[in-house]
Every structure is written in structure tokens, then in C-alpha cells.
Image (cartoon, rainbow, N blue to C red):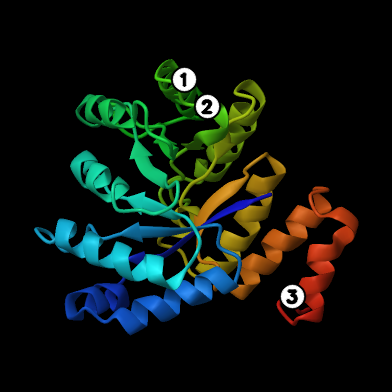
């Protein structure tokens, strides 16, 4: 089944940032409950936007979010020390976002991950910068999966992020992502692929339709997870329809249930 990492509890979003500043637990609770009800698999929690306040903010968020849902969390920070602190506060086996091949990030993250029970998002980034081709993404994916396996992580717990980049910057970024995902899923059997779906449409009009079509095309190439908004009814409809067409919905029951409930409409 497709893994949906609910992206909405992120202080880069103004409403979330305001709620965190004001310690508005009701706003966060209501949003998390909606994500849970609408099909999220994990709730992503990111408190990195308020510089100098990340530690206190994520501690507060983790307490509020875990009271609002039984779902596991994706703890999300660029700071390995914050991730390690947050890991000790979660009640269920989390997903950790993220590790990359950048030395300053890789070394402390490997030290942190050894012996930990968690899933990990592995970014196809190294010290040379963002990947410029599908070959770059694939080679980095193979390298980071090998390193994670060396410390005992199982492929089923590794979610490779090909680093989806905007079409507005380079029209080849869509084909690069699709080619990379297809090869990763074939050559690294057992791993998952995920990423920030909406990155593809940055800077373009009518972003939601771009995201929907891109999701289905990525799924056709093996993409089995996304960091996305489960409250977007249209993209969830595209996801459930794509799952059915790909043969991942026995007797089409999930699709039929969603139509009957009004979640999928023509």
C-alpha cells in the first residue's frame, strides 16, 4: 500500500507557525485529526522555521500531536541533534527525515541511527550538491542504501528521496525523477521511494493539477510513498484510482468505498 506522509504540521506554513508561536493546541489537534481521518500513514512534524526555537517547539508539537492521533510520526529536521532528541519523545516507531551523503550530516546521523528502531528517509544529496541527472540520483541512492545496510537497516525501512525539483527550473526534472524512481525500485529491491510531491509544480500556475498528474505518473514508475497533503481531495482521489489501476486494491473495494462516501467524485 502507498505510504502517505501527511505534510501539514510544518512551521514553514504560516498558520502552523502562528499556532506554534501562540501554543494553540486546538488548531494543531484539529488538523492532525483531519489528516488521520483522511488517510495519512504518518504525520510529519517539522518545527524548523522559527530559528532558535526548534527544540522547544518540536517538544511542544510532539506532545500535542501524539495526543491527537494514534498514527506514527515522521520526525523532520535538518539537525541530527533535534532528531535524536525527538526520537526519545515519540511513543511509536517513527520515520526519521532525513539522512543524506553530505559528510556533515551523514556522520552524526549514522552514529544516531545505529541500533535504533525506525524508518529513514534517505536523500539523494551529497557534497557536490543537488543531482543533475537520473544517473546522479541512482548512483547516490545505491551508495546511501549500501551505507544504511552496513549499519543494520533493512531495505523495507529505507525510503529513498530522489529530490524532486521544479519543472519551472528545468523541464527535464519530471522525466529525471520518473526514470530515477523506476531504476531505484528495480535495482534496489525492497526499498521504498518518497519525496515532496509538490516540489514539481513550484513557480507554476494551477499547481494542484500538476501535482495530481505527476503523482499518478510517478506511481506508474514504482513510486510508493509521498510527502503530501491528505486533505487535498483531488490528489487523494487520483492516488486511490491509481492504486486500483495498478492492481493494489482487491476487488476495487477501496475505490468503491471512496466513491460511495463522496470522497471521489466525477
Q: Looking at the picture, how far across and down is residue 221, in whole percent? A: 68, 39
Q: Residues within 10 Å of mark 1 (few under 14, many from 20)?
A: few
Q: Is the Cβ of the residue at disc 1 closer than 8 Å to that at disc 2?
A: yes
- Report the residue at 43% width, 19% height from top: 143
Q: Please name which of the two marks, 1 or 3, marks the residue nearer to the observer.
A: 1
- Report the residue at 54% width, 52% height from top: 226
Q: Give whichever of discs 1 and 3 has the lower sequence position.
A: 1
Q: Give whichever of discs 2 and 3 has the lower sequence position.
A: 2
Q: Which residue, given by chain and number where applicable, does mark 3 sit on? A: 264
Q: Looking at the picture, how far across and down is residue 54, in whole percent? A: 17, 58
> Residue 148 occupies which quadrant of the picture?
top left
Q: Which residue, given by chain and number where applicable, does mark 1 sit on? A: 149
Q: Which residue, given by chain and number where applicable, does mark 2 sit on? A: 154
Whether residue 19 appears in this view of the structure is yes
Regarding mark 1 in the picture, which secondary structure is present there? helix
Regarding mark 2 in the picture, which secondary structure is present there? loop
Amino acid at each position: 500500500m502507498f505510504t502517505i506522509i501527511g505534510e501539514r504540521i510544518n512551521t514553514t506554513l504560516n498558520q502552523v507557525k502562528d499556532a506554534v508561536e501562540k501554543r494553540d493546541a486546538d488548531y494543531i489537534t484539529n488538523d492532525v485529526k483531519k489528516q488521520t481521518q483522511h488517510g495519512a500513514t504518518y504525520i510529519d512534524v517539522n518545527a524548523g522555521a522559527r530559528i532558535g526555537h526548534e527544540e522547544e517547539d518540536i517538544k511542544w508539537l510532539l506532545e500535542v500531536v501524539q495526543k491527537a492521533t494514534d498514527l506514527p510520526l515522521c520526525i523532520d529536521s535538518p539537525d541530527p541533534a533535534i532528531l535524536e532528541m525527538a526520537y526519545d519523545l515519540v511513543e511509536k516507531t517513527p520515520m526519521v527525515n532525513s539522512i543524506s551523503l553530505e559528510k556533515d550530516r551523514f556522520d552524526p546521523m549514522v552514529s544516531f541511527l545505529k541500533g535504533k528502531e525506525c524508518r529513514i528517509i534517505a536523500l539523494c544529496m551529497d557534497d557536490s550538491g543537488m543531482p543533475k541527472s537520473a544517473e546522479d540520483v541512482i548512483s547516490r541512492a545505491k551508495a546511501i542504501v549500501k551505507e544504511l545496510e552496513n549499519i543494520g537497516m533493512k531495505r523495507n525501512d529505507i525510503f529513498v528521496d530522489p529530490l524532486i525539483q521544479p519543472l519551472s527550473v528545468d523541464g527535464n526534472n519530471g522525466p529525471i525523477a520518473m526514470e530515477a524512481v523506476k531504476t531505484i525500485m528495480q535495482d534496489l529491491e525492497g526499498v521504498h521511494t518518497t519525496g515532496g510531491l509538490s516540489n514539481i509544480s513550484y513557480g507554476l500556475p494551477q499547481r494542484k493539477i500538476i501535482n495530481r498528474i505527476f503523482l499518478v505518473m510517478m506511481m506508474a514508475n514504482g513510486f510508493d510513498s509521498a510527502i503530501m497533503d491528505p486533505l487535498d481531495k483531488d490528489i487523494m482521489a487520483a492516488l486511490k484510482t491509481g492504486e486500483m489501476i495498478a492492481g493494489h486494491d482487491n476487488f476495487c473495494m477501496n475505490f468503491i468505498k471512496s466513491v460511495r462516501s463522496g470522497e471521489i467524485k466525477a
